[in-house]
Amino acid sequence: MRLARLLAMPPLMLLPAACCTGRVPRLPADPDHAPIALQEAVQLGGSRQWLLIRGADRSKPLLLFLHGGPGSPYMGFAQQFQAALEQHFVVVHWDQRGAGKSYPGTPAESMTVQQFQSDTHELVLHLRRRFQRERLFLLGHSWGAYLGIHEAWRHPENLHAFVGTGQMIDLLEQERQSHRWAQAQARARHDDSAERELAGLGEPPYADTVRGMSTKYGKLWAYGGMMEGETGPGRFVRGMLGSPDYSLRDLYHFVRGSRFSLQQLARNEGAGFWSLQAPSPQPRFRTPIYFIAGEQDRVTPTSLVRAYAQSLEAPDKQVFLIPGAGHFAFYTHPERFSEAVLEALGRPRPGGEGGSR
């Protein structure tokens, strides 16, 4: 039970020094178009952090995938949902500081929004240098979409485009809406104990951030509000147990890091934690902005995403809706999600960049 509770954390979240892992296909005649499949450690903000880099052709455009949480990396089950993306991109997953493989030795005081934003920018610059690319594509989920959209706003010169899925728009408002949904579900199911527990918390901002969010997200899982058809995060655990890229030690660090990340970020940010928002009001972006939203997302409501998309200015923008999907559309509907990514990133962009390097 403790493992399930720790894994139920809310999705909000340079020196190469490792070796190849996993099953690397035989190299083609042209090494410039060889597959790539490796893990490596990098130094970001003085902290050792881990990357998984996979693609069928190393010459393809870079796609950096920022995971949610904070503290919930997707490296351990990436191969379950990104096979199609690997045919078109070199996909990079990053276990952020305090999470998964990057959990050991993370200083608690370094867990701040400013440091995460700095790490994100440093990694973008590192990948551009490492792969000799002028720009890359940035994709973020939930907490990672918060980091990603701020990177797109501040440093558009490094990006072809940004894609946000499960996009965090306004943390306080989304938490209030998901709290109300959980309460409504408790009443409809005559779950008196849960209804009393949620009422006792009061609406966000919770007096005790970690206790409040852990309790509320536990109810969201129980009522199917996190992932359609699932009442707990066991599907993620099973994926990591079968992963060639994650060991049992890594899974242990995933569990420890998920709680550590929320605790320390909330503690270090204090009241400012509840003010996290996408750039506003009426932001003007200089790179294309796309959103892929699950129609049944109870965590980052589609209504907030649509309203935000309408308010922003960008060289190109669009919201792609995936019917029947929830907050983890990329995982539960990988084919439709990959189609949406390819449709978005294949659109003509300013300067005729297309799918360029």
Image (cartoon, grey):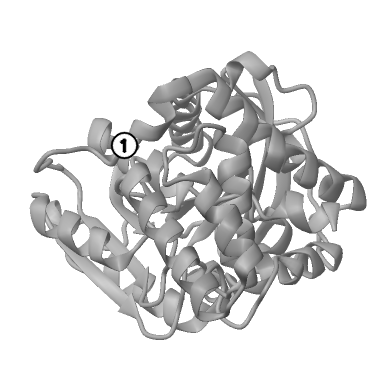
Task: Tell me residue 162's x, y (percent).
Answer: 31, 52
Please tell me which residue lies in front, 189 or 162: 189
Query: Residue at 79% across / 49% down in the picture?
Result: 20
* Residue found at x 78% / y 46%: 255
Residue 83 as seen in the image, left or right of residue 255: left
Quick check: 235 left or right of 59?
right
Q: Residues within 10 Å of mark 1 (few under 14, many from 20)?
A: some
Q: Is residue 270 above or below residue 293?
A: above
- Circle 1 sits in a helix, a strand or a loop, which is it? helix
Viewer-closest of 274 and 342: 274
Residue in the picture at 50% in, 73% down:
187
Image location of residue 247, percent across then percent down: 88, 52
Q: Is residue 260 visible?
A: yes
Q: Is residue 31 visible?
A: no
Q: Which residue is mark 1?
A: 150
- Answer with left or right where residue 133 lies relative to residue 34: left
